[in-house]
Amino acid sequence: MHLAQKDSVLSLAILIIIIIAWMSLTKPKRIVNYELYSPIPESVINHSPTVIIDTTHTGLVIYYPPVDSINLRCLERPDPVKDEEIVFCCAGAYTGTREKGHSNIAGDHVSSGRRFKGYKCTRNTGCFVFYNGKWKFLYEVYSNELDSAAAHNGAGYAQEMLIHNGKSLKTARPDNNVNLFRALCERGGKLCVADATDKMAFGDFKQLLLDAGIQEALYTDMGHGWNYSWYREYADSNAIFIHKEYQEAATNWIVFYASK
């Protein structure tokens, strides 16, 4: 190789080294926003809503209260000021027109671990029980489960079953009956309370529940004053009324307590 050729090759090699060095210095660096990987602040966790509200389903408002502790409050209406530990309440079983007391509640029921005898109600085709931190919806046969709820300091009530195992059931209430309806439900493995946003036909309400993916639905007593209900967005916040009016004769309410 001639000397001129050697100089040319050497110059080319030096030029390549210079280019590589320049590219390494000017290569854009990956910017990492470490804030995106930071844990959620405790302040945010502690201020998550106690009662989750879902308004994404047409014609329904679905409430998801905490389910650590549930009871059937009987003969003493829940008061949002006095009952600070309650975060959601609504009526449960029907109330009759008889003398005051547990015998004026439709069907046998369990409150604070005690089973009480109510009046016979042919509309009661289903039951909800809660004990040992778990709930169950029963259809047609449920007396033994009421005993179990009582034995384990639980709660339970009977009512009209609207939906069981994801299927609509025939009810004594006609589908063309119009009212503002509500049901205690199970959806996606979670316990919830589903309210109609407006008066509608009973059959339409059941269909909206099915469309929303409700697998279990047990009716709750409704009607003006019977639909007394409220919740707390946060455990330590003031109550927000869903329906403020109440009937003096009302006898029972499902109550959900704040998680401890």
Image (tube, grey):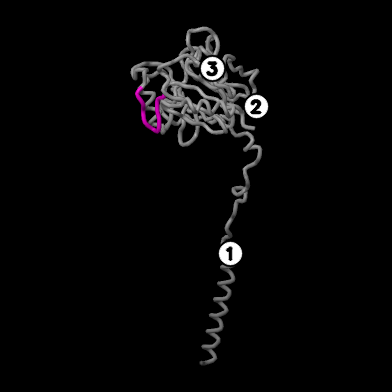
CA gap, disc 2 and disc 3: 24 Å
Tag 3: residue type?
Asn
How busy is the neighbourhood of tag 2: few (under 14 within 10 Å), some, or many (20 plus)? few
Which corner quadrant holds the C terminus?
Answer: top right
- The relative height of residue 199 versus residue 235 in the rendered view (above or below) is above
**One can see residue 78 in this view:** yes
- N-terminal of the two: label 2 or label 3? 2
Q: Indicate the position of residue 145 as horizontal and vertical percent values.
A: 50, 28
- N-terminal of the two: label 1 or label 2? 1
Q: Indicate the position of residue 65 as horizontal and vertical percent values.
A: 55, 29
Check residue 15 for magenta coloring.
no
**Residue at image mark 2:** 236
**Circle number at residue 26:** 1
Q: Is residue 193 left or right of residue 174?
A: right
CA gap, disc 1 and disc 2: 56 Å
- N-terminal of the two: label 1 or label 3? 1
Depth check: give the residue in front, 127 or 6: 127
Range shown magenta? 161-170
Residue at image x 46%, y 14%? 223
**Residue at image mark 3:** 252
SS for tag 1?
helix
How busy is the neighbourhood of tag 3: few (under 14 within 10 Å), some, or many (20 plus)? many
How busy is the neighbourhood of tag 1: few (under 14 within 10 Å), some, or many (20 plus)? few
Q: Is residue 226 left or right of residue 258?
A: left
